[in-house]
């Protein structure tokens, strides 16, 4: 009966232990959100999507960003684990109830060391209870503990910056994918306008042929050009549909139909060389990849300190406290020598305690410490070269995007003038053809020249909008609307 009561009292203490663990405020492992399941539209629905909306959606559902979040949370947990090295306290409680048979079929007589009487066969239920607490506090560990904590903190900061770098990469990829589709859609608009002009040209040529003012072959020539443009328009529509389908899958919209609404307005051109230097300084300070590499270099320096700590002697304070009649306690020794085994686990209780310190000095370890320190120093050197490599990539991103913008803006004005001249030329040739002063070949060439000029101008607008976003991302920020706006 007493055993059952003891077991119940032990089980009652479990909620208190659970409450103590909850006070440590250790969050459960994070579960990545599934926003696409909650916000996904029904199949066949149309989703209007601007560039900012697409980027925000990509940051919510892309597995790379969710993975970076989990890695950052793990690094925060690693900081706590490193801080726990400042001391170690372990508390164990054991409650045992078992049946034993002792000293049967003996080959030598076993006697009680206290009374000198020989033991006989002893059997029955035996209950034991034991509670022990062990404390270890490193007084001096060669700066290993502080260096380990500093390293964990630097790695935590690096993981947080890597999360930002991942978000920037995902946003940049979405920006490029978005404008790849919009570029095709802009070309499709130009093709639709050109097809409308070809429809008018077919009517003009047909009326002249029916009136006997032009040879019948003119109808075949203009109709051939119109059919080619129809085929080109169908190809552009199919390409745009494929791009929107891929974009919908990447954004977690499934079978929804996307409608991309971002305009291709051309903002003011960038400033001169002084502006790119300012952008480069901002990028060097803000790019998360470079900042994460710096933190990882600091963590590598801390690892060198950890390796060097083995050269130092270590001094650790230790303390232990035990109570009960289980193995390792005074009561257990008393029960063993007296032979007073009992089913009651709380009989013959006793305690033991000790307090001391341990000094450890590493005199020789076959150069293991020396090689570990050298390897850690090599890691620092490699990490510094990684910083240099990332710095060059950052500079290349900024300067290349800025130079590309200057090139696009420099060519845009001639393209606009070419489009205007081609439109004027088409009007002149069309009037001359109506009056019988121009050939059908001149009419077709003027149509084709205007079409190419409008396509080049549309491509230029899309390229400028995309490059502005790439320059914005190159400075370490999330690309948004064209023109570098957040």
Image (cartoon, rainbow, N blue to C red):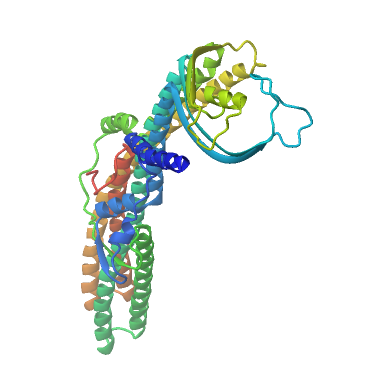
Q: Horizontally, is 147 left or right of 277 in the view?
A: right
What is the x, y in percent for residue 193? 25, 69
Q: Quadrant of the C terminus?
A: top left
Q: Is residue 438 above or below residue 384?
A: below
The quadrant holding residue 38 is bottom left
Residue at left 45%, top 40%? 2
The x and y percentages for residue 313 are 54, 11
Q: Is residue 179 or residue 67 the one in the foreground?
A: 67
Instruction: Indicate left or right for 444 with 67 as reference.
Output: left
For residue 351, above or below residue 224:
above
Determine the image quadrant of residue 82. Answer: top left
**267 and 201: which is toward the camera:** 267
Quadrant of the drawing holding the N terminus = top left
Q: Residue 453 at what x, y percent from top left?
A: 29, 60
> What is the count of numbered marks?
0
* Residue 3 visible from this viewpoint: yes
Which residue occupies 34% across, 41% down? 401
Residue 453 visible (yes or no): no
Residue 263 relative to residue 407: left or right? left
Depth order, front residue of 475/170? 170
Whether residue 200 is situated above or below residue 128 in the rendered picture: below
What percent of the width, then of the height, locates residue 445? 33, 68
Residue depicted at x 25% and y 54%: 53
């Amino acid at each position: 009966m007493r055993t059952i009561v003891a077991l119940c009292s032990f089980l009652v203490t479990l909620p208190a232990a659970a409450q103590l663990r909850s006070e440590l405020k250790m969050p459960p492992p994070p579960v990545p959100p599934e926003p696409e399941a909650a916000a996904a539209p029904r199949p066949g629905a149309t989703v209007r999507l601007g560039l900012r909306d697409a980027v925000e959606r990509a940051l919510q559902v892309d597995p790379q960003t969710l993975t970076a979040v989990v890695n950052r949370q793990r690094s925060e947990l690693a900081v706590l684990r490193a801080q726990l090295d400042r001391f170690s306290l372990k508390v164990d409680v054991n409650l045992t109830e078992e049946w034993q048979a002792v000293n049967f079929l003996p080959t030598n007589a076993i006697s009680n060391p206290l009374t000198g009487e020989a033991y006989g066969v002893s059997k029955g239920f035996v209950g034991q209870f034991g509670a022990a607490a062990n404390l270890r506090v490193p007084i001096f560990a060669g700066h290993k503990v502080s260096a380990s904590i500093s390293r964990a903190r630097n790695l935590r900061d690096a993981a947080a910056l890597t999360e930002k770098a991942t978000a920037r990469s995902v946003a940049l990829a979405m920006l490029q994918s978005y404008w790849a589709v919009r570029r095709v859609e802009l070309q499709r608009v130009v093709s639709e306008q050109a097809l409308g002009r070809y429809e008018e040209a077919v009517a003009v040529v047909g009326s002249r042929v029916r009136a006997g003012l032009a040879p019948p072959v003119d109808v075949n020539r203009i109709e051939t050009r119109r059919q080619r443009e129809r085929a080109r328009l169908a190809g552009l529509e199919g390409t745009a549909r494929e791009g929107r389908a891929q974009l919908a899958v990447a954004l977690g919209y499934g079978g929804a139909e996307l409608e991309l609404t971002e305009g291709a307005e051309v903002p003011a051109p960038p400033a001169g060389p002084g502006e790119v230097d300012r952008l480069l300084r901002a990028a060097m300070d803000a790019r998360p990849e470079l900042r994460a590499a710096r933190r990882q270099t600091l963590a590598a320096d801390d690892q060198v300190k950890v390796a060097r700590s083995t050269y130092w002697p270590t001094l650790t304070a230790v303390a232990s406290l035990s109570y009960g009649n289980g193995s390792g306690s005074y009561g257990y020794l008393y029960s063993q020598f007296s032979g007073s085994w009992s089913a009651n686990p709380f009989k013959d209780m006793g305690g033991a305690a000790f307090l001391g310190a341990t000094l450890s000095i590493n005199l020789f370890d076959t150069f293991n410490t020396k090689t570990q320190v050298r390897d850690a120093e090599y890691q620092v050197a490699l990490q510094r070269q990684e910083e240099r490599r990332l710095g060059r990539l950052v500079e290349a991103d900024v300067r290349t995007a800025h130079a590309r913008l200057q090139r696009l803006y420099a060519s845009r004005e001639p393209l606009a003038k070419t489009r205007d001249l081609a439109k004027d030329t088409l009007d002149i040739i069309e009037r001359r053809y109506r009056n019988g002063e121009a050939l059908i070949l001149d009419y077709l060439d003027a149509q084709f020249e205007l079409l190419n000029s409008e396509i080049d101008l549309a491509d230029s607008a899309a390229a400028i909008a995309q490059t502005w976003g790439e320059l914005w991302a190159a400075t370490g920020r999330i690309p948004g609307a064209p023109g570098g706006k957040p």
